[in-house]
Amino acid sequence: MLYEALEAQARERLPQVVFDYFAGGSGEESTLADNTAAWARLRLRPRVLRDVSSVDTTTEFLGVTLSSPVLVAPTAFHSLAHPDAELATAQGTREAGSLLVLSSRSSRRIEDVASHAGPWWFQVYVFRDRGLTRALVQRAAAAGARALVLTADTPYVGRKRRNRGDASLPLADEDFLANLEGLTHRALAEQAPDVTFADISRLSEDSGLPVLVKGVLRADDALECLHHGASGLIVSNHGGRQLDGALATADALPEVVSATAGRAPVLVDGGVRSGRDVLRALALGARAVLLGRPVLWGLATGGAAGVRQVLETLREDTAHTLALAGLSRVSAVGPDVLAPPRAP
């Protein structure tokens, strides 16, 4: 399996502290493990005698057409994985016909990454200094970001037993603070614990961009996000890195999709590792999935070419899975592809 092989290769190449930083989850890592297991619990009901001689995986939403319903999730500090850092990630993502969600904690400047990217969104935290947040999203908009992704589940950073803190990472200050102009110390880059739904519309006003909210696991939160102007939602538990024991994203997705009732696109991340998982997510109502750790392992083992290979391999696996399920295009996926839950 590509993911398992890539992870093993990345473990060999990266310093242990860096591998653990990327791979680890919070607490006992129960949510981290369940994210992957939850997709596998969903059984598929394939159709037969359908013409699948040609399978179309292209996907369109928010004005962007992509080669497949697989995006690159925001992850921090790519210089820890490869010397070309986010520049390589952006290039590989562009060459694969996908979309990059650039982390505000990237180790390369927004403007430099944008010059290597295809379509991209900018992930943002609301910092304690909201003036810093405003300046950051305005820079992203000026550099060509097509949307903002507000990470909503990190009023504080989850405690991870495998990690020894940012200070232990072999990360220069200029990489840590690459996008935080005017700051001279890491401690000043803290996220605001008083972030609220009102920040959604404020970010949109400050940037002139649509805002998607990442970290939604509940129907009531989904509705509040839409009420305050969100243009999309990302069902996410931060890759199992925040509240350990939070439900897996595959389990949370149906509730959020049902609550939104088609008013805005719903995306999902967490534990997606195969074309079967992509099909399952689409069948539950997601418009697309986001890929985090597999992209980092591709970057660590092959730079831009490694990122491209991860995305292209998953696109090909998705097309193959669709064909085996009797589906010739992404838009044909519906809930009937999933079998009813088995009795315990």
Image: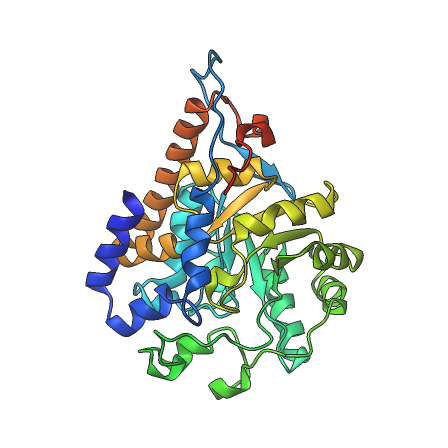
- Foreground: 340 or 316? 340
Q: Position of residue 53 (x, y in %)?
A: 42, 15
Q: Is residue 93 above or below residue 114?
A: above
Image spot of residue 160 (x, y percent): 41, 74
Name which quarter of the figure residue 330 lies in. top right
Q: Is residue 167 left or right of residue 140?
A: left
> Residue visible at 43% across and 33% down?
318
Looking at the image, can residue 16 be seen? yes
Would residue 27 be found to the left or right of residue 199 on screen?
A: left
Which residue is the extreme one toward the front?
Answer: 344
Examine the rendered structure and indicate whether residue 210 appears above or below residue 316.
below
**Quadrant where the N terminus lies?**
top left
Q: Position of residue 276 (x, y in %)?
A: 43, 36
Front position in the image: 8 or 311: 8
Report x, y in % for residue 51: 47, 13
Which color scheme is applied?
rainbow
- Which residue: 31% across, 78% down? 170
In the picture, measured across the screen, residue 154 lies left or right of residue 14, that is right
Residue found farthest to the left:
12
